[in-house]
Amino acid sequence: MTDNASLAVGPLGVRLQGIQHFGLTVQNMDRAYEFYTEVLGGTKVFFHGDFQGDAVQNTLLADQEIRANELQVDPRTIGVPDLRSGDQRLDVRFVRFDNVVVELLQYRNAGEPMGGPNSFAPPVQNMSPAFPRMMHICFYVRDDVDFNQFISDLEAESARRGMTQVRANRIVRVRTEEERRAAPRDANTNRVTVAPSDGWELIYCKGPEGEQLEFVKVLGPVKQRFADAAEEHDRLRVPR
């Protein structure tokens, strides 16, 4: 039998409790927070802001400062804020969903108000999920929800709030925004029928900051595969 003390120095996997949160750097903090709480129903955990100083700079940005030195350029030209002197500040807000926490981060100039629309660095304009290092946040939709209706309602509610960037892809080919909007509602959802992903339903959607989102339903055979993997994961973590 393995005791808890030995687990603290055991394989890396058994020292983990899982994923604590996903972080998303935003341009407009208030807009992003409204989307993740009022539109998608997340719950506020806490806010913290005005981070600055040498320790914060070193903890978050040392690798990028080294990169700037290697390139012999001003760190700001590659998007590195100056938290060290306080010229820029960092604010964070944590939003809880049932099974994960999303952290919203905004780097801003010191003269800008907390929660405002102006970030220190401009947003990246092209956010293709094909770019290496790109990440996405995936939301798990309940089995009994009409998926096509969910996406229609998400787009409508976001548009009502002026978040016109929230747009879901369709499974049919569209060449313009007008064609995307005109696509039939049943073209919203991609239903996978080929093993081992059979039972997976998905929709890709951009969020209000241009971030990549995914909404999924996990049904039938693929749902069982996830359940089996969870059971195996728990079995391997049990002290022996």
Image (tube, rainbow, N blue to C red):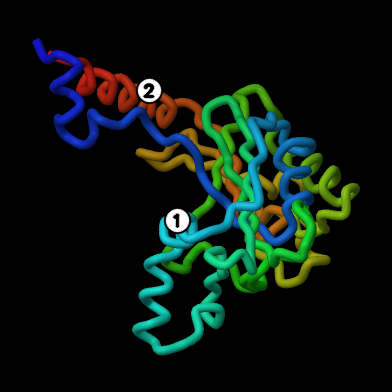
Residue that numbered label 2 is attached to: 227
Label at residue 226: none
Q: Amino acid at mark 2?
A: Ala
Front in this rendered view, residue 65 or 193: 65
Considering only order in the chain, which callout, 1 or 2, is on the residue closer to the N terminus?
A: 1
Position in image of residue 193 (x %, y %): 47, 40
Name the outermost residue toward the bottom.
72
Mark 2–mark 1 Cα distance, whole angstroms, equals 42 Å
* Disc 2 crowd, CA 10 A, few/some/many (<14, 14-19, 20+): few
Q: Residue furthest top?
A: 1
Residue 12 falls in image quadrant: top left
> Is residue 172 visible in the rendered structure shown here?
no
In the picture provided, is 184 more to the left or to the right than 78? right
Looking at the image, is 227 positioned above or below residue 150?
Answer: above
Rendered residue at 15%/30% (across/down):
9
Residue 151 pos. (x, y %):
73, 42
Residue at left offset 85%, top offset 46%:
156
Regarding mark 1 in the picture, which secondary structure is present there?
A: helix
Quadrant hosting residue 152: top right
Dot 2 falls on a residue whose secondary structure is helix
Instruction: Using the rendered image of the protein, determine whether residue 50 is visible from the camera's viewpoint.
Output: yes
Relative depth, front residue between 214 and 79: 79
**Badge 1 density bin: few <14, some 14–19, many ≥20, Cα 10 Å:** few
- Coordinates of residue 235 in the picture (x, y in percent): 23, 18
Asked if the residue under mark 1 is in contact with the one under mark 2, i.e. CB atoms within 8 Å, the reply is no
Instruction: Kindly identify the amino acid type of the residue bearing the numbered disc 1.
Output: Ala
Quarter of the image where the C terminus is located: top left
Q: Residue furthest right?
A: 160
| Residue bearing mark 1 | 55
